[in-house]
Amino acid sequence: MRLGSTEQNLGDFKQSVLDENDLVNFEENSTPLFRTANEQAPRATTPVDKRMKLLRKQRDRIEIDDSLSFVEREERLQRIEDKMKSAVATFNEKWYETE
């Protein structure tokens, strides 16, 4: 027996061990052992993640807004930075309370 590609050999193995229904159930209910470069690891989204994402978007918009003076931009960025620190501190407090 000539060995082909790994993918072909794996396919032959699946077909020899599993019938068609088992194969469909296996592929639907299993998680891959390896991820391709384009796939990201699953991640739990928390309210803090959402809050930080929103604050980063606000910060980015302020940084590119040319209509603001330097002082006004710095004040707004500082307020957003304070909100980000507060969100992280609140998350950390809750995290350590649960341990």
Image: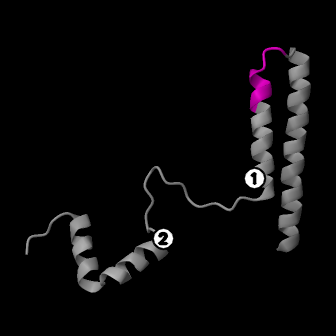
Residue matched to label 1: 49
Badge 2 crowding class, 10 Å Cα cut-off, few under 14, some 14 to 19, many 20 or more, is few
Compared to residue 42, the image places residue 16 above or below, namely below
On the image, the x and y values in percent for residue 45 come to 71, 58
Q: Which mark is first along the chain, 2 or 1?
A: 2
The correct choice, above or below, for 59 with respect to 7 in the image is: above
In the picture, the quarter occupied by the C terminus is bottom right
Relative to 82, 26 lies left or right? left
Q: Position of residue 50 (x, y in %)?
A: 76, 51
- The residue at the point 64 percent across, 60 percent down is 43
Q: Mark 1 and mark 2: span between their CA atoms?
A: 24 Å
Q: Of residues 3 and 47, which is closer to you in this image?
A: 47
Q: Nearer the viewer, residue 72 or 89?
A: 72
Q: Are marks 1 and 2 in contact (CB under 8 Å)?
A: no
Residue 23 spot, x, y in % from top left: 35, 78
Q: Main secondary structure of the magenta part?
A: helix
For label 1, count other residues whose C-alpha is less than 10 Å away and answer few (under 14), some (14-19) or many (20+): some
Which stretch appears magenta? 60-67
For residue 69, above or below residue 39: above
- The question of residue 62 being in magenta is answered with yes
Q: Quadrant of residue 73?
A: top right
Callout 2 amino acid: Thr
> Helix, strand or loop at disc 1?
helix
Quadrant in the rendering for residue 68: top right
Query: Which residue lies most toward the left here?
Result: 1
Task: Give coordinates of residue 46: x percent, y percent.
Answer: 76, 59
Query: Mark 2 = which residue?
Result: 31
Side of 74 where 27 appears, left or right = left
The residue located at (31%, 80%) in the rendering is 20
**Is 31 left, or right, of 3 in this rendering?**
right
The amino acid type of the residue labelled 1 equals Asp
